Every structure is written in structure tokens, then in C-alpha cells.
Image (spheres, rainbow, N blue to C red):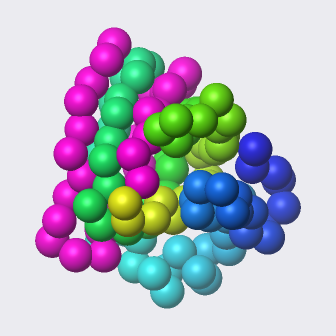
Amino acid sequence: MATSSSTPESSSNFGIIIECNPPDSKLSELGIKSWPKWGCPPGKYTFKYNAEETCYLLKGKVKVFPKGSSEFLEFGARDLVIIPKGITCTWHVSVAMDKYYKFDSSSTPSSSFDT
């Protein structure tokens, strides 16, 4: 689970990296505000990542369950998250979410929505 420090947290099992409350200078350097935005209401969303995604959550709270695991990672507003290419996971969104996002190529993840 993400903590309140600004040190990146990662799970070697999943390859997901979470940086809580990164400094504005880092967000500016990444050009976050020029990235597309995506949002969703509470629900379950399954994604297969064909490309690495970097996202910055503006609001919301989510638990991510990698396929085949009962373990999860939790993150929310003001977290910078990197999700590796090749992972399939289900997002359990408990609080409506808005995020900026960027993929490392023109590929996007396939998804299905279970609400």
C-alpha cells in the first residue's frame, strides 16, 4: 500500500511503482498537465497493459489487483504511478477517479468494465 512519503514504493511481485505526493517540480518536468485526462466512477475495471503507463491521480482511490493474485496495491489522489507493460490487473475504484496518463508508445491497454 502507498505511504505518505515522497519516496517511490514498488512491488517486486508486480513491477508497479507508486510515488506519493511527488514535488511540483517533478510533475512539471514530466509535463503532466499536457497529458490526456481520464476519469471513471466507482466500479471494477480490468486492463491488460500493452505498453507501460505513467499516471498521476488528481482525485480518487483505487486498489489494483494483478491477475492471479489476492494481493493488491492501493493508491489515490496525488500519487504518481508507473504500471509496467505486460501486466493484467483489475482496478477496484472506491472513490470516483480523475487522472492524467501517458503510455510509452501509441499502444493502449485493452479494458473491460465491470460495475
Place of residue 8 in the rendered image (x, y in percent of width and height, measured from the top left): 73, 69
In the picture provided, is 27 more to the left or to the right than 105? right
Q: Is 103 contained in the magenta span?
A: yes
| Rendered location of residue 43, percent (x, y) | 41, 19
Residue 19 in view: yes
Tell me: 59 left or right of 33.
right
At a point 36% along the width and 29% down the height, the residue shown is 45
The quarter of the rendered structure image containing the N terminus is top right
Q: Is residue 35 something that shows in the picture?
A: no
Q: Residue at x 45, y 81 (%)?
A: 30
Q: Main secondary structure of the magenta part?
A: strand
Residue range highlighted in magenta: 87-115
Please state if 59 lies on the left or on the right of 42 as rendered.
right
Residue pictured at 59% horizontal, 55% vertical:
14
The C terminus lies in quadrant: top left
Quarter where residue 52 is shown: bottom left
Residue furthest to the top in view is 115
Q: Nearer the viewer, residue 2 or 14?
A: 14
Q: Give left or right: position of 1 versus 44.
A: right
